[in-house]
Image (cartoon, helix red, strand yellow):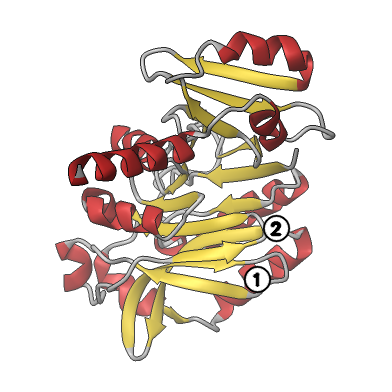
Amino acid sequence: MTLLRIATTSLATLEDFAPPYNLSHPDPDATFARGLDLVDAAGAMKADLVCLPETFKAAGLPASRIRELAEPLDGPSIRILAERARRHRMHIVAGLFAWIDGEIHNVAVLIDRDGRLVGTYSKKHPTEGEIEGGVTPGSASAVFETDIGRIGLAICFDLNWRELWAQMKEDGADIVCWLSAYEGGFPLQAYAWLHGFTIVSSVQSYAGKIIDRSGRILAATSRWGRLTSWDFDTGKRWLHTDGQGEAILAVQKTYGDRLRVETFGEEHVFSIESRDPALAADDVVREMGLVTIEDYISRCDAAQRAGRRA
């Protein structure tokens, strides 16, 4: 059992920082400082990963200020975030306007525990207003290998292009960090279910969310709480009930409180998650002769190909 603590944030940028939460006029330096406070709080919680929203320093500001606020990838904002990542020994994903090869991009940056810039993703599908403000669209999806799994990056309006999410799945993403100005809503839950990855959203507005592969919202920020987290067993396994639904009770009897079993009746799926450091879910799969949903789908694909040839 290996636990992974994921944290995410929201900014509610157009409100003052404290009650009575009157409307404010965002100042980029104050917004950046707010983001750093959230990062430090996530560090105090010993998070392995924390996300900050799309272009978070520029949140709430008009497109006319994009050029003014864009920085190079070795600029002060990324250097400060890298120092925080080193200080707290955690990964940081954050959104910025950045100059890359003489062009402005809306980027998500991934910084590792050592403060190294692992990679960047340039928003592939910016809005018309962003393009009019000088933003150049990106051209490719991005998934990066880290010590907490393969992390995919997406930004805001990308939500409306399904092929980008399918590509991240094809590239092996375990976690997708979606940085946005708005909440996104149900499509995020649908993508988590369809592609079998965890989605972490961080937003300029109110509700940043952590969504597991069942499509459930496990944790969310709010007007009152701008930081939330959830602990995952990275060895958790998902299985289909076909041919093994009758094994669920046997698993529960055999492993008792060493294992957490959840069932999803309408989807015909169940999950197993270790509660014992000495027990891995993969051990249970092997010892009980079970088949994960990924392996079952692969077997069905092979049987279908053989059936078509026949």
User: Percent position (x, y) of residue 136?
Assistant: 25, 77
Q: Can you give x and y, in whole percent of width and height, for residue 303 in the image?
A: 32, 39
Q: Which residue is mark 1?
A: 82
Q: Quadrant of residue 189?
A: top left
The quarter in which the N terminus is drawn is top right
Q: Nearer the viewer, mark 1 or mark 2?
A: 2
What residue is shown at x 79% (from left), y 32% (from top)? 279
* Quadrant in which the C terminus appears: top left
Looking at this view, is 194 or 207 the one in front?
194
Q: Quadrant of residue 133?
A: bottom left
Q: Amino acid at mark 1?
A: Ala
Q: Is residue 277 left or right of residue 116?
A: right
Q: Residues within 10 Å of mark 2 (few under 14, many from 20)?
A: many
Q: Three-letter amino acid code at disc 2?
A: Met
Q: Is residue 289 above or below residue 253?
A: below
Circle 2 is placed at which residue position?
90
- Classify mark 1: residues with Cα within 10 Å, few (<14), some (14-19) or many (20+): many
